[in-house]
Image: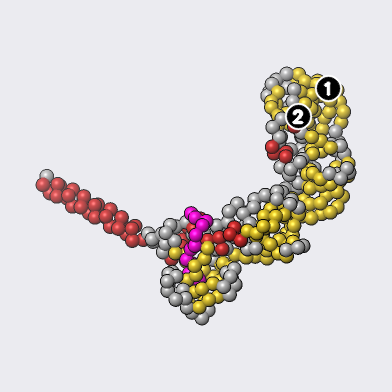
Amino acid sequence: MVKARCMKRIIAVILSFGLIFSFTIGLDAAAPPNSSAYQKSGRSMLPPVISLLEDTNLYPVPDESVEPWAALTPQDVSTVEADVDHPYLEGDTQGKIWIKIKTTWLGDLWVHLEREKVGILKPADTYLALLWDARLYSEPVRSAMTEAVLSPQTVHANAVFESPFAMYSSSYRIETSWLGDRWIVANPHYLQVEVLNSELDLPTETLYMDEYDTANRLQRSSDARFIPAQKVFAMEKTDNGVYHVRGQNGSTFWVNPQFAQPVGVKKIDETIELTKNTEQHLFPTMPFPIFGLISPQKVNAFEQWDDPQGNRWYRIHSWSGEMWIQP
């Protein structure tokens, strides 16, 4: 009996020691948040390469009271680590941050950069459709704002500055006819577009959109406006297939050929019996917008259309207007 109790105590001590040893090893293995090992673990947003936007002093330690060893002209440099008080660089978009970079002749040294200036400058060849008035900047940072403002228009961008501290969006360097190159900074109100300047055929009645996303914001079917079948002049096209066009009367607006009545509609006069709650679609070619459900009942259809998958759609008169249903 005594021997059994002794064995239990020995086992308990061994287990306790094992837990303590395991816990200690775990603590030793965890790198401090601002250490190089922690940065390399992938939890930091520090880019592997950053672009120095101006002449930048190089320091042997992260301390501006120390005499800088040298300075670098604007160029791309490889980063080593960041001196931060927390593991995530995105915690603060203001102030400055110390970053250790690689140099070819002095080894690894520190630079002290405004957080907004931490990023990579890349060439670009894209067009931006400015949806609202846009303030222009002399550099890709908010502190470099100028008095110049561009009205909504399409501009060409020849560079982009991508930063983990960017507010709303990346900054784009655009070309202007009177100020030369300027920057669009912290401005989410633009679309990347493809310039077309060609004719676009709208073969059926199509949704008229004041803004590029009008279809997403329709609350009532009565808010929808349509234009009859016609040819329009397409100025630009977004990645989502939305066109910025000029109509025959000279007005400019947006259209999406998917938000239109389908080609090949057949006129009918047929009673359809609905056996379940059925969605009412403004267009059978798109999953939205949808305006309510029709409960099981008999309805009169005046048009029908078969989609490419062989599904038959019917157009009816309802309290929501002329809607498409699929029984």
Question: Which of the two labelled residues, at mark 1 and mark 2, occupies the earlier sequence position?
Answer: 2
Whether residue 311 is visible, yes or no, is no
Q: Is residue 218 visible?
A: yes
Q: What's the CA distance linking mark 1 and mark 2? A: 25 Å
Whether residue 149 sits left or right of residue 72 in the image: it is right
Residue most extreme to the bottom: 105
Reply yes or no: does residue 178 show up in magenta. no
Residue in the picture at 81% in, 51% down = 235
Q: Position of residue 57 (x, y in %)?
A: 51, 73
Identity of the residue drawn at 30% across and 58% down: 24
Q: Amino acid at mark 2?
A: Ser
Q: Which residue is mark 1?
A: 270
Q: Position of residue 202 (x, y in %)?
A: 85, 42
Using the image, determine if residue 295 lies above or below residue 47: above
- Residue type at tag 1: Glu
Task: Tell me which segment is drawn in magenta.
Answer: 91-101
Report the front residue among 48 and 167: 167
**Residue depicted at 79% across the width and 52% down the height:** 236
**Residue 62 percent location from the top left of the image:** 43, 69
Image height of 228 relative to 236, above or below: above
Q: Residue at x 77, y 40 (%)?
A: 209
* Secondary structure under the numbered disc 1 in the rendered image: strand
- Report whether 199 appears left or right of 111: right
Label 2 SS: helix
Q: Nearer the viewer, residue 133 or 88?
A: 133
The residue sitting at the top extreme is 297
User: In the rendered image, which residue does mark 2 sit on?
Assistant: 222
Q: Nearer the viewer, residue 15 or 3?
A: 15
Question: Vertical placement of 222 versus 109: above or below?
Answer: above
Q: Is residue 107 left or right of residue 209?
A: left
Determine the image quadrant of residue 275: top right
The residue most toward the front is 147
